[in-house]
Image (spheres, helix red, strand yellow):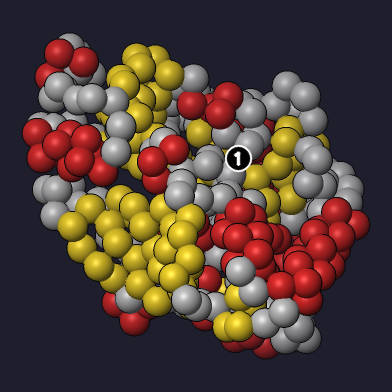
Amino acid sequence: MKNLFERLPEVRGRYTENFDLGAKSWFGCGGHSEIAFKPKDYNDLERFLLNCPEEIPVHIFGALSNCIIRDGGVTGVTIRLGRAFSKIDVDNNKIICGALALDSNVANVAADHGLAGLEFFSGIPGSIGGAIKMNAGCYGSETKDVLIECKGIDRKGNLITLTPKDLKMTYRHTTLPDDVILIEATFRGTEDNPEIVKKRILDIQKSRQESQPIREKTGGSTFTNPSEEELKKADLPIETKVWQLIDQVGGRGLRVGGAQMSEKHCNFMINMSNATASDLEELGEIIKERVFDKFGIALQWEIKRIGEN
């Protein structure tokens, strides 16, 4: 966008032109952001949104854990929240944290204070903002089960508070408006013995290490599990998981360029060495096509694909 930098408001944070966004993603590949903005704090973010021209695209990313930044990059301004948005506090049985707080850190702080119910966050890569936006979950729990409320700021600088009911949270889905940037969340824990809670976290981490390629350049689960309705229509058991469908169409270990469906868990894509974002997306589309051809099930991406091809 011509002369974009000159049209942006003065801030106390930092602007970076041609920021290598793809390199910061967990896949470690992809394009650049035209301009990245790291606000100093909430007031700096509010000032930016209030004064940024409406025609300039604004995007928000957290830990970049479950997204593919397409090779053509991202136009406009990419907001990258900093340390001011990663604080975690405890108030009785409530955990109040910034949107950039890592899911695993939230689980660990809750455990330190003898609060149970948030252990599953230790099995989810990324930050709390992303977990809320997609109602992330694992091991039988979802974000909606423990979320009391979250706060966000919209493109016009308005501070809004949303509950799980407001967000209509369902399996890997919410109705969070695209122009709302989450900044804080409050979760509910239940009192328990800290050592018992920590043991549950260790069990989850051990299970992940044994079943998922967590030491590879990966973005977590690639596709969501099919609904019961879809499985019944395909005459498949309702407990069938998406990795089983991928396995049955020869997806385990399948490669496109430097991208591969993991041998360890075939619903995880990994960057073997020099994958491009296009390699990753093409691999996912091949898997989708194979599963649809064999089972008539249209897989839904869990990984977000962002930017220009």
92 over 210 or under it: above or below: below
User: What residue is drawn where x is 29% and y is 62%?
Assistant: 151
Locate the N terminus by quadrant: top left
Q: Is residue 25 left or right of residue 292?
A: left
Q: Residue 102: percent from the left, percent from the top? A: 56, 50
Residue type (three-letter) at the residue carrying disc 1: Glu
Q: Is residue 67 left or right of residue 158?
A: right
Which quadrant of the figure has residue 27? top right
User: What residue is drawn where x is 31% and y is 21%?
Assistant: 14
User: What residue is drawn where x is 78% and y is 46%?
Assistant: 214
Q: For mark 1, what is the residue?
A: 281
Which quadrant of the figure has residue 76? top left
Q: Residue 230: percent from the left, percent from the top? A: 62, 80
Is residue 189 visible in the rendered structure shown here? yes
60 over 197 or under it: above or below: above
User: What residue is drawn where x is 78% and y is 38%?
Assistant: 216
Q: Residue 74: percent from the left, percent from the top? A: 38, 29
Q: Residue 218: percent from the left, percent from the top? A: 70, 42
218 over 137 or under it: above or below: above
Observer-nearest residue: 298 or 109?
Answer: 109
In what element is the residue under mark 1? helix
Observer-nearest residue: 176 or 100?
Answer: 100
Q: Is residue 97 left or right of residue 257?
A: left
Is residue 226 visible in the rendered structure shown here? no
Mark 1 Cα shell of 10 Å, populated few (<14), some (14-19), many (≥20): some
Task: Give the mark count.
Answer: 1
